[in-house]
Amino acid sequence: MKNVGIAILLFAGLCCAQESGAFQPASTNVWGAEYPRVDSSGRVQIRVKAPDATKVRLNFWSGPKLDMEKQTDGFWTITTPPLVPGLHYYTFIIDSAEVSDTNSQAFFGGGKYTSMVEVPESGSTYYSIQNVPQGQVREIWYDSKVTGTWRHALVYLPPNYDTQIKVRYPVLYLQHGAGEDETGWIRQGHANFILDNLIAGGNCKPMIIVMAYGYARRAGQVPPDLTGKPFGSPEMMRSMQDMAAAFEDDVTQVLIPYVDSTFRTLSDRDHRAMAGLSMGGMQTFQITLNHLDLFSYIGGFSGAGGMLVLGDRKLDPKTDYNGVFADPAAFAKKVH
Amino acid sequence: MKNVGIAILLFAGLCCAQESGAFQPASTNVWGAEYPRVDSSGRVQIRVKAPDATKVRLNFWSGPKLDMEKQTDGFWTITTPPLVPGLHYYTFIIDSAEVSDTNSQAFFGGGKYTSMVEVPESGSTYYSIQNVPQGQVREIWYDSKVTGTWRHALVYLPPNYDTQIKVRYPVLYLQHGAGEDETGWIRQGHANFILDNLIAGGNCKPMIIVMAYGYARRAGQVPPDLTGKPFGSPEMMRSMQDMAAAFEDDVTQVLIPYVDSTFRTLSDRDHRAMAGLSMGGMQTFQITLNHLDLFSYIGGFSGAGGMLVLGDRKLDPKTDYNGVFADPAAFAKKVH
């Protein structure tokens, strides 16, 4: 045998099919991984090899931690109760170390690359790839004078963008939640497949979606030293406000001009939207309400509207967010 | 405090700056991670929290496993000897479980998402992003009749592809090594930045690069059960040959036509190249030598030329690879 190294790696991907009964390998597994596997009721079987460990727990973020059971072959195994359809984050806790499952693809969540298992939704096709005209996801890198760094973003372009070269498109800026990153709406969320399907069904106008990296620090600013500062301390709040303000400037002063000069956008406020999940919703409210000259559509999914702006006090509609809520009728006219 | 969940995740990214001396956080870390960190001599400091573990080792794939030292705060730490510049794969072995470092970005290698640390090359700029005209990396999904699945690939398009809409480009098919995947040449290899820099310096013709997923199984074929079959067994070799043949058909019958109909390529053999690393080199030799009607440039980097085709016997130039080596002069004329 020549080239043993290559062959070993190839072999790892081929070996070994096992009896799975009603359980099938999850769609979120890496090539060749038999575990995690899921049955039609949503139960998940997971295993991890740790022959010398004394305690291994499965940590599904959507539920309580579960003790895994040690087998004689050095694997720890578990079968979960039925989980609701969808994508579930999980980690292992092996002798107190919280780690990811090397059988799973890695998804950025909780501030790290972690594991997920998809429990399929029976009969559902809206978020999976279908035989319809496809958009494309592109990676862009833009040089931000705000942060002094090159920043990475993903951009979804709708079907036929390359061929209908006279057409310009509205733009949605779509932000991930805290602990996730610019890849989340595509990797976890399948936003590209959902848009392709919505557009094919006539349920959505073709649009460009820009997914930016939601963390930012101004050029030259040193990372804050929050050692010993308790959660919720003024120093911590200021750090979070600094980051949110840096991101606001990055989006409005650098990213939007970059996108409008790179892609065939409709660049007026009537064709620019922003939305986000959780922290991304918070950023959406801060950025859009401070820049109604740039945005006319606003979406917050579990968005934390006033956290950084207001802290513990109530909204003052006359002054907060540049007073955009002082005249509700005028605001309603400005925003779709 | 409202929205404690979001705030905790934000806080995790902010906290806590620490004394680092001459060591700086690696460029391969996730946002906010202080470790791994690297000094100018190439030494790397790494740590992992595992207060209840009894033995933790650092497994740099480029060197021997190193014992880490338990600290009173529950972290295990180590400072490595100087490492050569470049990107180094590593894992932790925590009480016998081999796991990735949640402080590192995740790179697909060894058949799983694993950790890497970049030791910078002093003064080197050729593989980092520079202020030159940029190409873009796009994700494509193509429906393969060979595998019966949607397959994901990355495509690098050179600078100005969107604006110079009359220009057509040569294409390089560039394959990853065993255990890696279609993302490797971009994530680990920075192929996009290297090409941008080469093109800007006039050292390379603008070209399209297609990076495909190198694993394939024919539609309807069940995964082989290699349980109990030793490494190098006929069953294992047949499985590997099956995969290589399925990939060959996928590339030549599906991927190339998809690329030529989706992008502005020069679609004759004189403008199509294939190259690959390790297993990707093996695939390159198999595919190009069997299809000289499609390819005129061939590149193998540590490529395992004959492994699957020849096994343990010597090359027979008269018959192997359709006899392309039977007439060396004729072969040399056909290939650039």
Image: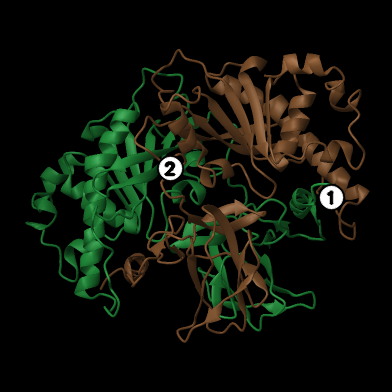
Chain colours: A green, B brown
Residue B114 seen anywhere in this rendered image of the structure? yes
Q: Give A47 or B306, whichever is nearer the viewer.
A: B306
Which residue lies at the image location 12% right of the left edge and 57% below the top edge? A320
- The circle drawn on residue B128 is 2
Q: Nearer the viewer, residue B335 or B184?
A: B335
The three-letter amino acid code for the residue at tag 2 is Ser
Q: Quadrant of the N terminus of chain B?
A: bottom left
For marks 2 and 1 on the same chain, the one whose residue lies earlier in the sequence: 2
Cα–Cα gap, marks 2 and 1: 42 Å
B114 horizontally vs A25: left or right: left
Residue drawn at point x = 24 percent, y = 44 percent = A145
B110 shown above or below A142: below
> Where does the image place residue B82, in percent across and percent down from the top left?
52, 63
Judged from the image, the secondary structure of the residue bearing numbered disc 1 is loop
**Residue at x-position 83% and y-position 41%:** B307
Observer able to see residue B268 = no
The residue under label 1 is which amino acid type?
Answer: Pro
Q: Position of residue B163 (x, y in %)?
A: 38, 20
The answer to whether residue A70 is left or right of residue A177 is: right
Q: Label 1 belongs to which residue?
A: B224
Asked whether, in this view, residue B235 is left or right of residue B215, the answer is right
Query: Residue B280, located in which quarter of the rendered image?
Result: top right
Residue nearer the viewer, B320 or B32: B320
Give the secondary structure at mark 2: loop
* Image quadrant where one finds the C terminus of chain B: top right
Disc 2: host chain: B
- The residue depicted at 14 percent of the width and 54 percent of the height is A321
Label 2 with label 1: CB-CB less than 8 Å: no
